[in-house]
Amino acid sequence: YRIHIHASYNNTIISLTNSRKDVLINSSGGLVGFKKAQRGGYEAAHQAAIDLVKKVKEKGIKIKNVEVLIKGFGPGRDAAFKAIASSENPWTIKRITDSTPLPFGGCRPRKARRL
């Protein structure tokens, strides 16, 4: 199984997928109950990860090993990982991968704004 953490500045989305990348369960800061700017925060990501673990237990999915794929620079990035890697969780984390896209080269940026 794989856990995908997409941490943007506006929201943190956490998805549990199988080896074929079919989404089984997902959770986010907005689904947990946070509104507007709070969705992207540390606490919202922590609550979303706890909610994902709770949904897995409710569905009865037996998980032993997990790969964690992290994408983005949002503040919920570390919070979600810490909640998944906590001692209360029986899952063994086999691999942690950071798949944040970084530009190299690319198009010329816009001219600097001067006020």
Image: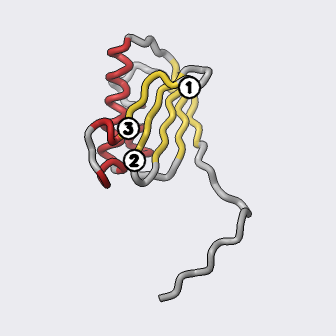
User: In the displayed structure, would residue 8 be above or below residue 115?
Assistant: above
Q: 91 left or right of 54?
A: right
Report the residue marked by disc 2: 11
User: In the displayed structure, would residue 90 be above or below residue 42?
Assistant: above
Q: 89 left or right of 106?
A: left
Mark-to-mark CA distance, 3 and 1: 23 Å
- Along the polypeptide, which appears first: circle 2 or circle 1? 2
Location of residue 25 in the rendering, given as x and y in whole percent from the top left corner: 43, 24
Residue type, mark 1 in image:
Lys
Location of residue 86 in the rendering, given as x and y in whole percent from the top left corner: 37, 30
Secondary structure at numbered mark 2: loop
Report the residue marked by disc 1: 94
Mark-to-mark CA distance, 2 and 1: 26 Å
Judge the density around disc 1: few (<14), some (14-19), many (≥20) Cα neighbours within 10 Å.
few
Tags 3 and 2 touching, CB below 8 Å: yes
Residue type, mark 2 in image:
Asn
Q: 32 left or right of 85?
A: left
Residue at x 33% of width, y 30% of height:
50
Residue at x 44% of width, y 11% of height:
62
Report the residue marked by disc 3: 28
Secondary structure at numbered mark 3: strand
Camera-nearest label, 2 or 1: 2
Residue type, mark 3 in image:
Ser
Residue at x 46% of width, y 50% of height:
8
User: In the displayed structure, would residue 40 be above or below residue 82?
Assistant: below
Give the quarter of the image for residue 13.
top left
